[in-house]
């Protein structure tokens, strides 16, 4: 193995451990309103999403129109049983609840979902101040009826929340060389279609 690569990997591991410790030691928590949200069964609120747990992870997803957000959710979906053993997890987007449900079904997602509809929640709770539809993760804690925001992180290519970028780098593929897609099936050319390719979409 290239010694420079090994040295950088060790530095990244050390910095990641340092970051985790800083997050654990951070006692800063900000009280937030009990925002109103929508689900397929009707209106709900942020407090209800804790579902009896003391910690809630809110995945901020830009909606079905973002391939990158879809990629992150595809990956996090695999961790869901592990997370839900101890925490409450919900995926939030601006899409209407019915749209969320259809898209989740098409992806095989098992997340509980709610829609903020692009309203006050996402503008005030964005993972990037001033940007009201950025993807990321927010951690909330319920303390004696108060909802406290304790931590957050932005999602983006190359981050620690989506391992595919690090796998691709082993093949020499960078963030500018690959874009996630909703599906990877490539249809045959019309001339090679056995059914005549009528009404091909």
Image: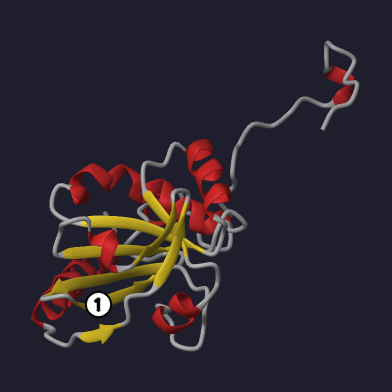
The residue located at (23%, 56%) in the rendering is 88
Whether 183 is drawn above or below 98: the answer is above
The residue located at (38%, 74%) in the rendering is 35
| Image color mode | secondary structure
Whether 193 is drawn above or below 132: the answer is above
The mark total stands at 1
Per the image, the residue denoted by label 1 is 151
Residue 153 relative to residue 132: left or right: left
Whether 187 is drawn above or below 161: the answer is above
Label 1 Cα crowd, 10 Å radius (few <14 / some 14-19 / many 20+) = some
Seen from the viewer's position, the closer of residues 153 and 184 is 153
Picture quadrant of residue 142: bottom left
Circle 1 sits in a helix, a strand or a loop, which is it?
A: strand
Residue 4 relative to residue 180: left or right: left
Seen from the viewer's position, the closer of residues 83 and 162 is 83
The residue located at (53%, 37%) in the rendering is 106
Residue 77 visible (yes or no): yes
The residue located at (24%, 77%) in the rendering is 151
The quadrant of the image that shows the C terminus is top right
């Amino acid at each position: 193995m290239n010694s420079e690569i090994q040295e950088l990997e060790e530095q990244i591991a050390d910095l990641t451990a340092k970051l985790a410790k800083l997050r654990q030691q951070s006692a800063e928590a900000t009280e937030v309103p009990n925002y109103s949200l929508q689900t397929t069964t009707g209106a709900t609120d942020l407090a209800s999403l804790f579902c009896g747990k003391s910690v809630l992870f809110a995945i901020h997803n830009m909606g079905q129109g973002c391939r990158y957000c879809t990629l992150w959710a595809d990956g996090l979906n695999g961790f869901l049983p592990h997370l839900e053993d101890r925490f409450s997890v919900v995926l939030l987007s601006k899409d209407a609840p019915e749209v969320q449900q259809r898209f989740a079904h098409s992806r095989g997602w098992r997340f509980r979902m709610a829609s903020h509809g692009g309203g006050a929640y996402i503008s005030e709770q964005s993972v990037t101040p001033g940007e009201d539809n950025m993807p990321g993760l927010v951690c909330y804690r319920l303390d004696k009826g108060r909802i406290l925001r304790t931590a957050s992180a932005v999602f983006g290519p190359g981050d620690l929340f989506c391992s595919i970028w690090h796998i691709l780098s082993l093949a020499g593929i960078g963030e500018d060389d690959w874009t996630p897609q909703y599906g990877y099936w490539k249809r045959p050319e019309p001339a090679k279609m056995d059914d005549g390719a009528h009404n091909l979409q």
